Image: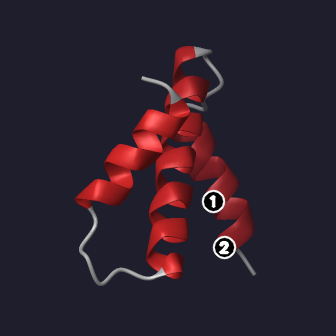
Amino acid sequence: MAVKEEVQKLIKNLPEDCTYEDIQYHLYVVEKIKNGMNRVENGEVSSHEKAKQRMAKWLSL
């Protein structure tokens, strides 16, 4: 599906009283999900163990 068609479908599914901010938020979320799925397909992911190690560095004081 073309991007324009996806956006039109997304907007049609939002409530009539939605705001510009609501539309922007939903577009942002869809883009982030698609980017994440593309990263998975391209093998650009970390193992659970590596993620835990990275989080441990960030969380340790």
Where does the N terminus fall, quadrant-wise? top left
| Residue 35: quarter of image | top right
Hey, what amino acid is under mark 2?
A: Leu
Say above or below: 54 vs 45.
below
Q: Are the residues tagged 1 and 2 within 8 Å (C-beta)?
A: yes
Residue at x 53% of width, y 80% of height: 21
| Residue 55: quarter of image | bottom right
Residue 18 in percent (x, y) is at: 35, 80
Q: Mark 2 points at which residue?
A: 59
Residue at x 56% of width, y 46% of height: 31
Q: Name the residue under label 1.
A: 55
- Quick check: 12 left or right of 21? left
- Quick check: 43 left or right of 54? left
Say above or below: 42 vs 39.
above
Badge 2 crowding class, 10 Å Cα cut-off, few under 14, some 14 to 19, many 20 or more, is few
CA–CA distance between discs 1 and 2?
6 Å
Tally of numbered discs: 2
